[in-house]
Amino acid sequence: MEKENKVLKIKTIKNGIVIDHIKRGKAPDVLKILGINENFRDALTFAMNVPSRELGKKDIVKVENRDIDTSEINKIAIIAPDATINIIKDYRVVKKEKVALPEQITGIIKCPNPQCITNKEREPVTSVFIVKQINPLILVCKYCEREISSGILNYIKAP
Amino acid sequence: MKGMRWTKKHIISINDFSRDEIDFVLEKSGILEKKLGSSSTSSLMNGKILANLFFEPSTRTRMSFEAAMKRLGGITIGFDHPGISSEVKGETIADTVRIVSGYADLIVIRHPIEGSARLASEYSDVPVINGGDGSNQHPTQTLLDLYTIKKEFKSIDGLDICIVGDLKYGRTVHSLASALGNYDVKIRFISPQELRAPRQIVKSLSDRGIEVKETTKLNLKNSDVIYVTRIQKERFPDPQEYERVKGAFVLNLNSLEGIRENAIIMHPLPRVSEISPDIDATKHARYFEQAKNGIPVRMALLCLVCGIKFW
């Protein structure tokens, strides 16, 4: 009974996306990745620290009238590797997919090393980070071999 | 060896090498050294051209590659100063490499930008060897360091190795430590507090089961290999702090008291004042021989990536 009440706290949406199973505390980061800020005009609901069987506690984000593209899904995978994306049409889940962290993350993260070749504008090169470890996440720049493990969101390129 | 592919392989980072591959290079370097000695030449690389692209000044690395190529009967082209390359006209590294790979059979590149050698390898039709990319990698230096150790002790496993000096910024130290992670060794890092080895290196060695100790005291006892690096003044915001620290990490005859009989002292060179010249004449000094070992190791690599069998 109590569980049902908790679920009901978050209103269902007609059309849009529901991002579920977000690692606890990461909902604000997901909003940043989606480029949602004070100028956003559609309905947005998010819940933090909701009980979850798999994660203990989790965050959930629901956004009305919003679609999501592959680049955004890949970015979410970096900060919330267990997240699931539900596409809602007319109150029904028409597509459900779990985000997946690829072995290499291409073009999404800006290398924090100013001396890295990927930060030299004129060279024909895209940033590539290799996933060295998933939990906790450690990424290694393919080019300068710099490792990043904390504050990864700061290095995710703006939408 | 099974599963290893050397022909057209790029030599970019020591982290790309498995232990088997490192051991293979060291073994083949030994064969070449025995075969050619230090003064004779061969015709293994007859008709082959090595392009040395040195976008920053280097004497030893460039000359060592040049000597290695010439001893193998090949020839070298290139530049050793960015002022005469097309980079000053605004050409990208990618374009330079694309063009030069049409002139030469293999390329050695040194560039101050980190990751430049990896990028170069993506635009080259011929093997690229990294001769140093900023403070990132210098894999042939690491291989010649390991070769020196193996030549001395026959095996790297079981050794006590201490690494002294600037462990925070030193490129050679990071690559060497990471390569030693493939072996059953004990490592002692000796440095001023401000220049301790990066946490990720210490952690990664520990994760691989290596016993790692860190200390600020220059105690060289119980070590087989004493690897010394230079402490650079510009790393210290306070010049007085540099002066205080510098003196504590200078090796002189006194610091060798009580060290193991067969211990060797290594240094990637150039040294400034961190090893007193008195030590040069002791049986422990190996740094000049270490530099010389760059020739057989680089000869072996040049042959391997060009698909030339010499064994």
Image (tube, rainbow, N blue to C red):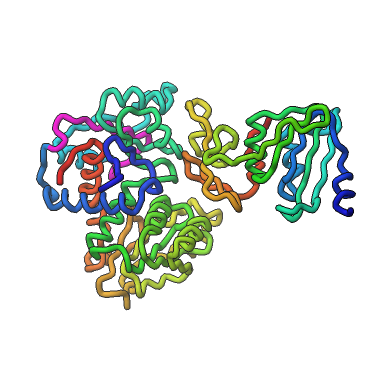
Number of dots carrying numbers = 0
Q: Is residue B209 left or right of residue A46?
A: left
In this rendering, position of residue B97 left or right of residue A120: left
Task: Identify whether B46 is placed above or below B145.
Answer: above
Q: Residue at x 59, y 37 (%)?
A: A109
Q: Closer to the camera, B46 or B277? A: B46
Q: Is residue A39 visible?
A: no
| Residue A29: image location, x then y, percent | 73, 42
Find out whether residue B113 is within the magenta segment. no
Whether residue B111 is visible to the viewer of this picture, yes or no, is: yes
Q: Which residue is rendered at x = 73% and y = 35% of the image?
A: A86
Q: Position of residue A45 (x, y in %)?
A: 84, 38
Residue B60 colored in magenta in the image: yes
Q: What is the x, y in percent for residue B289?
A: 22, 56
Q: Is residue B120 depicted above or below A25 in this figure? A: above
Front position in the image: B278 or B186: B186
Residue at 78 percent across and 31 percent down: it is A88
Along the viewing direction, whichever of A77 and B170 lies nearer the viewer = A77
Residue stretch rendered in magenta on the structure? B44-61
Instruction: Provide residue B262's location: percent of width, then percent of height.
Output: 25, 71
